[in-house]
Amino acid sequence: MSLLIGLLSFALFLVCLFLCLLVLVQLPKKEAGMGQAFGGGTTDALFGAGAGNALTSLTKYSAGAFLVLSLTVSVLGSKAGAGKTKLVRAELGKAAASAPAANALGTAVTNAVKTATNAVAPAK
């Protein structure tokens, strides 16, 4: 399971690098001014007739791959963590099973110390 998580994490790293390079290589739109930044042409940006070029479609696919890989690594990592939690709980259960003998010994020592303290201490 950890090998699969490692391989998917490496693939996610490569997709992140590729996505960063794609975004940096793309040219800005011609009307990318302050009006566009504050929502002046949102309908044109969302519902424009332009299909974009190859870089735009590559960016869309790599963003989709990033999303899928991120969710997959997250789910697999949580399942691997749950398996480790079960192992820790089993070890704690074994330790708790042997604890009553140690607890009885601790109680006997505590009672002996109290008795010795009461015998040595002067009565008030």
Image: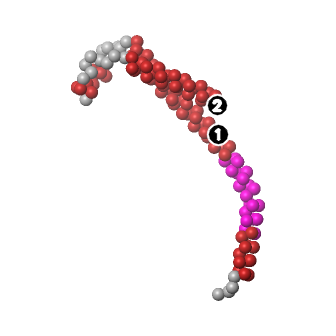
Q: Amino acid at mark 1?
A: Gly
Q: Look at the image and tell me in which quarter the C terminus lies.
A: bottom right
Q: Is residue 78 left or right of residue 98?
A: left
- Residue at mark 2 to residue at mark 1: CA–CA distance: 11 Å
- Say the numbered circle drawn on residue 1: 2
Colour mode of the rendering? secondary structure
Residue at x-position 75% and y-position 56%: 98
The residue range painted magenta reads 89-108
- In the rendered structure, does residue 63 fall within the stretch colored magenta? no
Q: Above or below — where is 78 with respect to 40?
A: below
Which sits in the foreground, 34 or 1?
34
Residue drawn where x is 70% and y is 48% of the image? 91
Q: Position of residue 30 (x, y in %)?
A: 27, 16
User: What is the x, y in percent for residue 58?
Assistant: 43, 16
The chief SS type of the magenta part is helix
Q: Secondary structure at mark 1?
A: helix
Q: Is residue 21 above or below residue 101?
A: above
Is label 2 in a helix, a strand or a loop? loop
> Which residue type carries mark 2?
Met
Q: Position of residue 74 (x, y in %)?
A: 54, 33
Which residue is at a point 40% across and 14% down the rendered structure image? 55
Q: Residues within 10 Å of mark 1 (few under 14, many from 20)?
A: few
